[in-house]
Amino acid sequence: MGGNLRSRRGAVGAEGPAGRDVLRHAVKGQRRDVALSSLLAAGHQAGEALIPVLIGLVIDRAVANSDGAALWWWTGALAVAYVGLSFSFRTGARLSERAAVAASHELRIALVGRVLHPGGGTEALGLPGALVNTATEDAKRVGAVNVAVMEAVAALAALGVSAAALLWISVPLGLVVLLGTPLLLWLGHLLSGPLERRSEAEQDRAGQASAVAADLVAGLRVLKGIGAESAAVARYRSASRASLAATLRATRAHAWQKGMTLGLTGVFIALVALIGGRLAAGGDISLGGLVSAVGLALFLLGPLEVVGWVNAEFAQGRSSAARIAKVLAAPPAVEPGPDALPVPVRGHVRLRGVSYAALRDVELEAAPGELLGVVAADPADALALLGCLGRVADPDAGAVELDGVALTALDPAEIRRVLLVAGHDADLFEGTLAGNVSAAVRRAPDGAGGLPWITAAAMAAAGADEVAEALPHGAATTVTERGRSLSGGQRQRVALARALAAEAPVLVLHDPTTAVDTVTEARMADALRDFRHGRTTILVTTSPALLAVTNRVVFLHGGRVTDSAPHARLVQRHESYRTAVFA
């Protein structure tokens, strides 16, 4: 399954997998375990169905004839049968659960791979919490279909063996089972329709509630700072109530489906018992046959309940598979191109007449090894520029080039390898401080103290070494999720060190020092210039300290390039530049 889903994911933008394909691959990918567990479960259920027959034979051939030897022989046969039933049940259940867990894992890997695909495209599907819900709950439900397949095969085997045994005991009883079982299966399928629809709505609402919760937790400090806790609580309460209402509707549909299935099953069992009793009263079957028939009728209650449960599992699995398929089939935001960059990458960046969002006919060039500053009077201009440079989106007109090759002609994965855009709001990961910085290091450790040389150098350049000195365990101190255990300035320095440690041929930094004091900022500016010497660096910022160390600055005003000169000259030439930088 994983290979098939990954191949589809690799061709995102083409026709993606439908929900039924996801279900089929979830079972097909674990076909060995599913087949073996189904075989064992079918054998187990067949054995269970034959137990009442064996008991009937004990009554007819041992108890009725007062034959002690036969009684011991048949009792031993029952004991052997129960040992075999125990082994087949435990082994089959273990294999089916393993298949379910493995399928869920493969789906999660495929979903995470699609979300992290360089071409993007899943951002439009909702908040991250909704995608997390799909990768957890929906993947788990689809994986559980493997257990349902095993249970379905076992239930059908039990029904088949029971029907054959009843035909052997009495043809009318066997015919009742053979004709009644397909009818029950068909009715169970019809009853699962409302459950499938409401289960999909339940998962949608649950995903939205999870997304809102994750969004609020991420911005908890900001909410407290502006006193917006009550509005945030009201927003989550609304999403939670909608999720609760959808869950209750799905639960009612599940209860109705299960109740109706049990009712129909009870009527069917009662009919089998009634016919068996009349046949025994008329002398058409023996006492042992009657006991076997009643035992089989009671035994059938289990497989028929399983049939109803299987229908419910398939209904929920189909709705979850459809949600997974929607993510896997999401078209990419940008398509990969056929060209490749020349080797080695020189780092020559050029924008030719680029128009995108707020940008209008932008002409901009960063020579190889240049430290270029970009000041945008409007923050929207800066965000649009960053989106084009990182190929998060393609410009509406014009072209962004790297070493003479248009970014639209390149694979986004190749672009990310050589052109790193470090956003202003870069998050840290849970783990050690050193682990965060060295996450993108491509070279093997070669420094003292257990740190790669480049990691230590990047931390020193970004001032993150001072952050490590202030922590109880230095660079080995654990950083909590998103770096919430650090202050804003500490997070910025660690994030900058991580970007520097990647040693990308082209590095684009967006306001990397807004949360640090002026003295530290000036020191970081000098260290940044020295660390990136000889490699192309673009600083999109309004920091005077950073702009002062650049070779030159491009000024964007009104979505257009207004001027390009060293920082000091632009300060003298343009009042709007002074306002943007010193305000």
Image: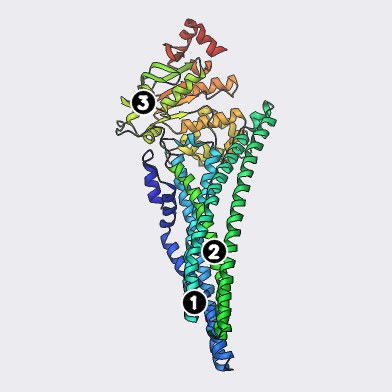
At horizontal 56% and vertical 68% (from top left) the residue drawn is 268
Q: Tag 3, which secondary structure?
A: loop
* Left or right relative to 536: residue 484: right
Q: Amino acid at mark 2?
A: Val
**Residue at label 1?**
172
Looking at the rendered image, the disc whose residue lies closer to the viewer, 3 or 2, is: 2
Q: Where is residue 555 shown, x and y percent of the image?
A: 45, 13
**Residue 195 to residue 565: above or below:** below
Asked if residue 202 can be seen in this view, the reply is yes
Q: Tag 1, which secondary structure?
A: helix
Q: Quadrant of residue 390?
A: top left
Q: How far, Cα to Cα, is label 3 from label 1?
A: 85 Å
- Say if mark 2 contacts mark 1, CB within 8 Å: no
At horizontal 45% and vertical 22% (from top left) the residue drawn is 384
Label 2: few (<14), some or many (≥20) within 10 Å?
some
Task: Give whichever of discs 3 and 1 has the lower sequence position.
Answer: 1
The one nearer the camera, 551 or 488, is 488
- Total number of numbered labels? 3
**Residue 59 to residue 402: above or below:** below
Task: Give whichever of discs 2 and 1 has the lower sequence position.
Answer: 1
**Residue 222 to residue 75: above or below:** above
Q: Amino acid at mark 3?
A: Gly
Q: Where is residue 428 shown, x and y percent of the image?
A: 55, 35
At horizontal 58% and vertical 56% (from top left) the residue drawn is 257
Q: Tag 2, which secondary structure?
A: helix
**Residue at label 3?**
347
Q: Tag on residue 304?
A: none
Q: How far, Cα to Cα, is label 3 from label 2?
A: 64 Å
- Say if mark 3 contacts mark 2, CB within 8 Å: no
Q: In the rendered image, which quarter contains the C terminus?
A: top right
Looking at the rendered image, the disc whose residue lies closer to the viewer, 2 or 1, is: 1
